[in-house]
């Protein structure tokens, strides 16, 4: 059993990458725990493991009894006198017992306890290894597809890409290689499971770090990422060093860097957006600088109107509104994409709503009083009314009605 245990130490040290001394200590503690159950405290058991000479022995004080011993902690008086001639019944004498003499059942129990402890140690080591990798990218091969996601072989542990962390339009089969972001490490039924994600913005961040040295070095900073997984991502970048072109670093020569990132995202559109402290310029960058003619900010609140040409309107809004929606998340502004004439109509309506009818050409004091009494208080009321409606108001003639209607139209 001694040499057998030594072989266990060497095997586990090699396969599980655990120090031999640590495994030896586990074997020692496990043997002591099993054998002590058959002894009393006076036996003072200790296990000695000699890795150099492949020996495992138990040292204990044996209780001298008159007749045949009933357990490991006893020795007959006759056997004791052969070792210590002066020995007498009731004394305790030291004895060294090879582990092989403790019986098959005891050895089997010890072996099981040793294996359990070593597995626990291995689990803790793996947990520690992957805990340090949390927040990093792991690569692995799809092993199988289960009801709750893809099981991925990422080395010394199984990875799980759960359904809720998958990208909607990405599908894999066994044998496919994928990269994913390590979200968490869990222990399930004694096994270490590494939870992965391909949906989270942090995945984009780490991909960009791996492809763009300036980001990894800190020369270019990612300030914010917004994403509709599988469709479009916007990344805000900035450099405090005026000599560094943050946008150019991320795109790369001939777009090679950003194309590599898109490739790893299976073609998902990735927009690089330059940070700017000026809200108008930042909004313009977020939509697409080349698409925007002007940006108007509301005097109160986080609202902005973006003026574009007709040929660029659909592009600025994006398929399904994704471009403008992500730009809104990026800038924290509510954004409206408008043509010039649409903007003018909206602003005209706003002016009409907030302006009194007294400001219209052709509204005399008498006509103004009559209109007010009839419920027409704002220019917008006149703009929406017909000439016939206005003529039915006492004190407003047809010529006056036509004049103020024309005035309201171009107000």
Image (spheres, rainbow, N blue to C red):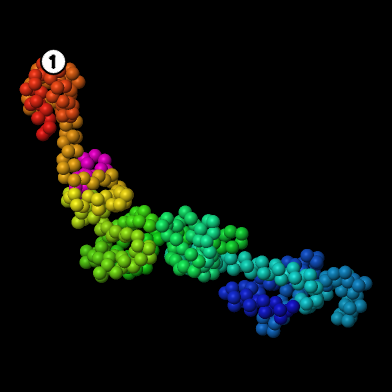
Quadrant of the image containing the N terminus: bottom right
User: Residue 90: image x %, image y %?
Assistant: 88, 70
User: Residue 326: image x %, image y %?
Assistant: 31, 51
**In the picture provided, is 145 more to the left or to the right than 240?**
right
74 in magenta? no
Q: Is residue 45 above or below residue 228?
A: below
User: Residue 261: image x %, image y %?
Assistant: 34, 65
Q: Is residue 298 above or below residue 311?
A: above
297 in magenta? yes
**Residue farthest top in this picture:** 394
Q: How many marks?
A: 1
**In the picture provided, is 117 more to the left or to the right than 328?**
right
Q: Is residue 179 above or below residue 407?
A: below
- Looking at the rendered structure, the secondary structure element under dot 1 is loop
Residue position for label 1 = 394
User: Residue 312: image x %, image y %?
Assistant: 21, 52
The quarter of the displayed image where residue 136 is located: bottom left
Question: Which secondary structure class fits the magenta region best?
Answer: strand
Residue 51 shows in this picture: yes
Residue 21 shows in this picture: no
- Residue drawn 59% across and 73% down? 16
- Residue drawn 48% across and 64% down? 173
**Residue farthest right in this picture:** 67
Assess disc 1: are there few (<14), some (14-19) or many (≥20) residues with their C-alpha within 10 Å of its C-alpha.
few
Q: Nearer the viewer, residue 124 or 297?
A: 297
Quadrant of the image containing the C terminus: top left
Instruction: Please give the range of residues in magenta.
Output: 296-308
- Residue drawn 71% across and 79% down? 4
**In the picture provided, is 98 more to the left or to the right than 16?**
right
């Amino acid at each position: 059993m001694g040499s057998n245990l030594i072989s266990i130490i060497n095997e586990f040290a090699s396969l599980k990458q655990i120090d031999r001394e640590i495994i030896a200590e586990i074997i020692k503690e496990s043997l002591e725990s099993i054998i002590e159950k058959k002894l009393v405290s006076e036996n003072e058991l200790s296990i000695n493991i000699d890795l150099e000479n492949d020996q495992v022995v138990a040292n204990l004080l044996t209780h001298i009894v008159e007749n045949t011993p009933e357990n490991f902690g006893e020795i007959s008086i006759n056997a004791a006198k052969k070792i210590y001639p002066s020995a007498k019944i009731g004394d305790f004498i030291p004895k060294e017992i090879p582990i092989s003499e403790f019986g098959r059942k005891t050895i089997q129990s010890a072996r099981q306890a040793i294996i359990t402890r070593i597995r626990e140690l291995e689990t803790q080591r793996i947990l520690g290894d992957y805990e340090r990798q949390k927040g990093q990218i792991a690569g692995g091969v799809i092993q199988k597809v289960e009801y709750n996601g893809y099981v991925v072989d990422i080395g010394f542990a199984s990875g799980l890409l759960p359904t809720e962390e998958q990208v909607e339009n990405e599908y894999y089969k066994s044998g496919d290689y994928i990269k994913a972001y390590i979200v968490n490490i869990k222990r399930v039924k004694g096994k270490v499971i590494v939870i992965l994600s391909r949906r989270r913005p942090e995945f984009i961040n780490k991909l960009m770090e791996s492809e763009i040295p300036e980001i990894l070095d800190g020369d270019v900073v990612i300030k914010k990422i917004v994403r509709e997984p599988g469709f479009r991502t916007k990344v805000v970048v900035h450099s405090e060093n005026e000599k560094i072109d943050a946008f150019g670093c991320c795109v790369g020569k001939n777009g090679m860097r950003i194309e590599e990132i898109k490739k790893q995202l299976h073609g998902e559109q990735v927009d690089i957006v330059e940070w700017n402290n000026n809200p108008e310029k930042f909004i313009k960058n977020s939509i697409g600088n080349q698409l925007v003619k002007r940006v108007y900010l509301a005097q109160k609140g986080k609202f902005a109107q973006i003026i574009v040409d007709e040929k660029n309107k659909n592009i600025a809004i994006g398929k399904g509104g994704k471009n403008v929606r992500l730009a809104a998340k990026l800038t924290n502004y509510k954004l409206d994409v408008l043509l010039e004439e649409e903007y003018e109509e909206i602003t005209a309506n706003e002016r009409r709503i907030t302006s009194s009818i007294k400001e219209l050409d052709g509204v005399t004091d008498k006509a103004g009083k009559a209109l007010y009494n009839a419920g027409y208080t704002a220019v917008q009321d006149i703009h929406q009314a017909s000439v016939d409606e206005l003529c039915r108001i006492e004190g407003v003639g047809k010529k006056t009605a036509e004049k103020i209607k024309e005035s309201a139209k171009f107000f």
